[in-house]
Amino acid sequence: MGTTQLESVPEPKYWHLRTVLSEALDSEFSVGEILPNERELAARFGVARATLRQALEQLELEGRLQRRRGVGTTVAPPRVGVAVGTEQHAWPGAAGDAWQPLDSVRATPPAAVAAALETGADEAVHTVRRSRTSHGQQVATELLYVPAASVPGLTAIDAPSGAARARAVLRELQHLSLDGEDRAVELGSARADDAKELDRLPGSPVLVVTTRFFAQGRTTALSVATYRADTCRLTFGDSTGVEIHHDPERRAS
Amino acid sequence: MGTTQLESVPEPKYWHLRTVLSEALDSEFSVGEILPNERELAARFGVARATLRQALEQLELEGRLQRRRGVGTTVAPPRVGVAVGTEQHAWPGAAGDAWQPLDSVRATPPAAVAAALETGADEAVHTVRRSRTSHGQQVATELLYVPAASVPGLTAIDAPSGAARARAVLRELQHLSLDGEDRAVELGSARADDAKELDRLPGSPVLVVTTRFFAQGRTTALSVATYRADTCRLTFGDSTGVEIHHDPERRAS
DNA sequence: GAGTGGTCTAGACCACTTC
DNA sequence: AAGTGGTCTAGACCACTCC
């Protein structure tokens, strides 16, 4: 009666470890504090380092820990609420949005993007790179695809390259009247370049937000934004205040 | 020239493997097809099984593969678009929503939930469990927390337990006029019970959608929904049609 | 019982940061 | 140079599904 779980369903060691560590983080550590190194922790719990690492990986995925090669493992601060789509129906680059234009090129987009934009498979589109910072840390990168047909006023002479060109594309977009937009969120893994920019390893989990912008009866622009999944909580709607920590194995009973 | 990457920045084996396998999936396999088993694949690529598994884990995270113990590894269908918050401003349980009520109890919620609901730490609230199915597969579980004060019309005698009680709580909610709602999406890992219901292993990645419902000037209900991250793409807005496959290492150039 | 993916071990070496 | 996390190996055994 006293035991909630009989021997019959032994939970994996790494899962149990995760729970023990999670509780220790709650009670014995404070944000920013450095944990003992992996070899030490493994020895202390009497498990192989790989098993310990499996537990740490879980906790990192949940945003509880931050690990940096050459440095150590620290207790992560609570996730940052990042507003996505508060300003309903505004073009990217509208006054006061959270993004910083980096550069822009004309290039052939991936096939899936071309399909969504209903452009020809080999048709070049303006590709604007932007980045987003929150609380002094870079939290997201974005690729914004804009078919040439969407910004007819843009001439190559306006701004040959770099951030100026990116701003020029965004500026042209504002001239159109936005009919609506459409968002999807899914889990992905960071490409090598995104990972580098977000200060993560390639393959680390990211939240991919795909937004379609509609005007003139078609998809006028398409944004693919990549958010760090470990540090970000994406918020939709008016407030950014929800602070529900999703703690596995803890529930009302 | 033929080599894109010089020796100077050797990418990890598992990452390279992931890329190779990903391309093989595109060209040589079709949805539902079974891959060779892990020992065989590892031998074929000349790596340890653990390394191969790291690559497979990536691909599973990206929704490209599906692995089932005792069965094998199969090529996953494209992610399902799951609408989250199309019907702006509707109570959970409103006519035609996608959720199936399972049961309901009165219980003390986790501290974080109590804080969001602004109830006392030890105050019991109605806790409704619901599940969501899409394309014949269970894609999400939900815990809906409703303070007793939000449903004053509900009496214990109405429906003692089970799905009937869950429906009774939802029915009472509809009587209030909903002022607004508020959403957040973050990455989490499945609790043991959620994992079981979603047919996943504990700790597998999930998208946690937290929704606050406002009425009468306060948070009247709070929903914590847990979606399978491997199979779901959460959609916001009018259409569910976006089909952008986020393919790491592939980009316009 | 055979075959699959899941867990775990005890090592080795590498890449990176810091001093 | 020392210390950290990241990668990789070659095995073992377990839990599960299916026949």
Image (tube, coloured by chain):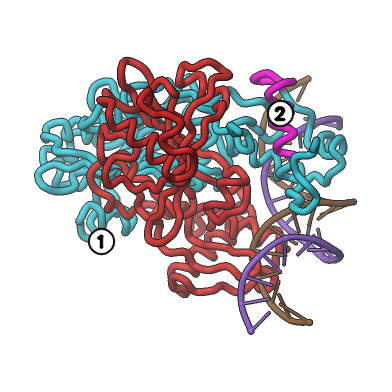
Chain colours: A red, B cyan, C purple, D brown
Q: Is residue A226 visible?
A: no
Relative to A50, B148 lies left or right: left
* Whole-percent x, y for residue B171 in the image: 19, 30
* Whole-percent x, y for residue B29 in the image: 71, 21
Question: For the point 20% across and 32% down, which residue is it?
Answer: B89
What amino acid is found at the position of numbered circle 2 in the picture?
Answer: Glu
What amino acid is found at the position of numbered circle 1 in the picture?
Answer: Ala
User: Up-down: is B130 above or below A122?
Assistant: below
* Whole-percent x, y for residue A236 in the image: 30, 41
Pick the front one: C7 or A76: A76
* Whole-percent x, y for residue A208 in the image: 47, 38
Q: Secondary structure at mark 1?
A: loop
Pick the front one: C5 or A6: C5
Of the two numbered discs 2 and 1 on the same chain, state the one appearing first in sequence: 2
The magenta stretch spans residue B131: no
Pick the front one: A65 or A42: A65
Tell me, for residue B121, which label it has, or none: 1
User: Up-down: is A145 above or below A84?
Assistant: above
Q: Secondary structure at mark 2?
A: helix
Give the residues in magenta. Answer: B17-33
Q: Which residue matches tag 2? A: B23
